[in-house]
Image (cartoon, rainbow, N blue to C red):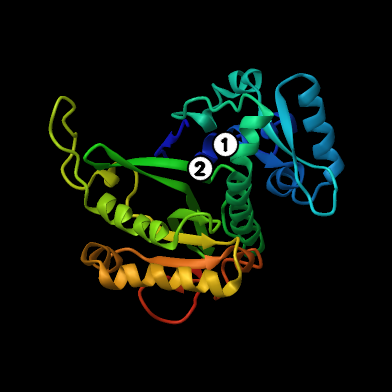
Amino acid sequence: MTRRSASAPASDAAPGPAEPLRLQVLAALAQHRIVTTGQLRRMLRPDGSRQLLSRVVNKLRSEEFVSCTVLPDADRSRTVAWFLTRKGSRVTRDLPVLRGRPPYPVTSATAASLKTPHTLTVVRAHLAFAADARRLGHEHGPWDWTPEVSHSIGDGERIVADAVIYYTAVEGEQRRKLRAFVEIDRSTMSSERLAVKLIEYARLFQYEAQSGRRRPDFAGPAWLRWYPVFPRVLFVLTGAPRTRLANRISDLQAMVAQHPLVAAFAREVPLGAAVLEDIEQGPARDVWRPLTSGANRPWTDLR
């Protein structure tokens, strides 16, 4: 699987509202990889019609720039998820918004179907933050959510965040820039494996690139090459009954309390967890459980 290395938010280089919608659709599929028509509408034209997006993606399909996979649906409605073909991937390769990321073609509907459940859940989380930003007058768009960001943590190992979010909270004359690593948990792995992600983030926090053939051009933690402050870490859980999700959050809190490296990390970096269905009602609400202690709060107020 091709993974994107860390990079700056792409908003300034992204196709803007004045760009043709077909270019925006291609860029969105290159950025987010697999997206439904409804998600594309909410992402690119939240006040537009589904028919508008349908016309565009169907035209792109007839030109062989995109293809789709049909999603299983309980009500037997025909919902499809779109992805770039190799031809579409070549077209988007030189877009500034994708600078620094290798091409990511999904070569068949079969390959797409293997990635679809997780990828669409990641997009759901992004859309929740984007809708909240529009409601609150904050800044967070389609290009401010970078999937699968990879960082070295030493010993030949890497951590891959499901996404990095770039978000600007605007409060009067003040602009507060926030960043977060986002981990999407669909309850498909064990609770222990999920909690181990905290150890990996704690290792990233401490990791300093070693001298060698490519000597670092600065001293200090390697993450300073990409972030002015270490991003907060947000776990978004779904795919299980509320009681089970609450237990998984408790296991994350136990890792913070019991593992010395994670405990030290948590004193420096805000950590929180929430249920996806709750943040879809607004991630700025008091739905985030701090992984240290305290009552639920908005993700922007995690300490």
Q: Is residue 170 visible?
A: yes
- Left or right: 210, with 229 as reference point: left
Question: How crowded is the residue under tag 1: few (<14 C-alpha within 10 Å), some, or many (20+)?
Answer: many
Q: Is residue 14 left or right of residue 293?
A: right
Residue, disc 1 = 31
Badge 2 marks a residue whose secondary structure is strand
Q: Earlier in the sequence, mark 2 or mark 1?
A: 1
How packed mark 2 is, by other alpha carbons closer than 10 Å (few <14, some 14-19, many 20 or more), is many
- In front: 240, or 25? 240
Q: Position of residue 211 (x, y in %)?
A: 12, 33
Q: Nearer the viewer, residue 215 or 124?
A: 124
Q: Residue type at mark 1: give it.
A: Gln
Q: Amino acid at mark 2?
A: Pro
Between 214 and 229, the one lying in front of the other is 214
- Quadrant placement of the C terminus: bottom left
Eyeballing the image, is 278 above or below 28? below
Mark number, residue 247? none
**Residue 288: % across, % down:** 50, 71
Q: Which mark is residue 147?
A: 2
Residue located at (80% from left, 32% from top): 56
